[in-house]
Image: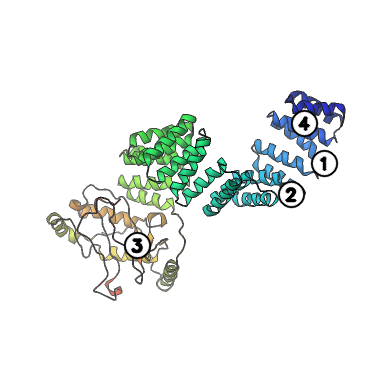
Amino acid sequence: MTQEFDQAVALARQGRLPEAEGLFAAAAAADPHNFAAHRMTALVRYQQGKLAPALEAIDAATAASPDTAEPWVLRGVILHRLGRGDDAVASLTRATDLDSRDAQAWYNRGIILGELGRFEDALASYDHALAIQEAPDLWANRAGALLNLKRAEEAVDSCNKALAAAPGYIPALCNRGMAYADLKRFSESVADLDQALAQAPGMVEAWINRGTVLHELGLFAEALASYDRALQLQATNRSAWVNRGDALVGLKRYAEALQNFERALELAPGPAAFVKRAATLHTLGRLSEALKAADEGLRMSADYSPAFEIRGRILLEMDRLEEGLESLRRSGGPLHEETDFQRRHDEEQRAYLAADGRAFSGERLAGPAINPANAAKVAHDWAARAPKIVVIDDLLTPEGLDALRRFCWGTPMWKRPYPGGYLGALPQYGFAVPLLAQIADELRTTFPTVIADHALRLLWGFKYDSTMKGITVHADQAAVNVNFWLTPDAANLDPDRGGLVVWNVCAPPDWD
């Protein structure tokens, strides 16, 4: 090396980076093939935060020595800082191709892949790095990738290895705390987060995570205190404001919760916060404002399922039944793991459709769906009975019954299996058609003293496997609960059993 180069190295070690940069850059300009000068120029520029000039210098270094792994690593780090994640991964992949034993390259590659949401690839990178050199930060970051892959038990194991090597290591405690939360081991989760916060009380994200876990435990006041601590540290943290609003909802302090969601929206508008605002306004009975908030959420994210769901519930309460059901249908439902009895049902339904072909799409009927002949008797029985339980034979007209049965038999909407051996069809899966809106409308007009001014809140269908136990004793949360029993009498091979058992007592006070 030249004397000038040695002097530049000494200056860099002393922290005199601008002077060192000048000497390194001069050496690089004097000899375009001087790999070391280009590399050091890039490094001191990066240390000063001069990212674009650093990239220019490291590109010159890789051109001067394209088969050396180390500059490709630095290039990946610089690209990452510039927000060019995919390019950063490509550069680090080049480094690992040149030197598969470069643990730092694998580690950095894993971090960036995780930020890009490519968690399987990130996990593989961390595993490569760990095969070369075990370290607590590698085990903790590996746990983070596993958390995002919903592999919580493996995440706990990775954190345990990090903590065995470095007791009290904060990132491992935080990740293990969240893994415990995923496993519903909430007390252990809080203990880990508390241990991390005892060492680093300024960790905003840890306070937010602690609040989230306490919320899951139903400790809303304690969760609120955690969010308050996070906001003391960072008053503009949008997540803390949203989660604080959730805690206030849990405490039934809806007006305050609304203020929190609005503060989050001021900081950074997002569909989730609009939905929470809509749900709170809905609870407060401010339906027009709630609908507007749900629509704002959909304007930000046209396919955002929670916005369609709350929008549908609001529209139902506004008596805009067909619009509400359509919105609920568009919300889509969470996928559930298929069961044997669901697969058997689906095969039977396909066979029915192939043999009969009489499926019904669920449009409104030209005539009535509810049988008006029952109106006077039901009004009398409802007024005379306490508790108010009325059994109605021939509730539907023959046309209404036939249409509803064909809709339920032929529509592939039975997507939610229950452990008791029955399947649910919810509006999210397709149990939301004009015929159902017509039935809801006519229930109110045919039985005005029963339904009164109560709006339709929710509806669903169940199909039962007769060899399994079915639904257990429960109470539905409704002012008026209406059950339709659609199975034909001929299908009941044991007429002394079957049907619906209604208990003529109120639900116990401690039931939710």
| Quadrant position of the N terminus in the picture | top right
* Disc ID at residue 462: 3
Count of marks placed on residues: 4
Considering depth in this image, is 366 or 137 the residue closer to the camera? 137
Q: Residues within 10 Å of mark 1 (few under 14, many from 20)?
A: some
Which color scheme is applied? Answer: rainbow
Q: CA distance from mark 2 to mark 4?
A: 26 Å
* Disc ID at residue 41: 4
- The residue tagged 2 is 101
Left or right of 129? Residue 99 is right
Left or right of 425? Residue 75 is right
Question: Looking at the image, is mark 1 or mark 3 nearer the viewer?
Answer: 1
Q: CA distance from mark 2 to mark 3?
A: 58 Å
* Disc ID at residue 65: 1
Which image quadrant is residue 32 in? top right
Type of residue at label 3? Phe
Considering depth in this image, is 97 or 303 the residue closer to the camera? 97
Type of residue at label 1? Ser
First in sequence: mark 1 vs mark 3: 1
Q: CA distance from mark 1 to mark 2?
A: 19 Å
Q: Residues within 10 Å of mark 3 (few under 14, many from 20)?
A: some
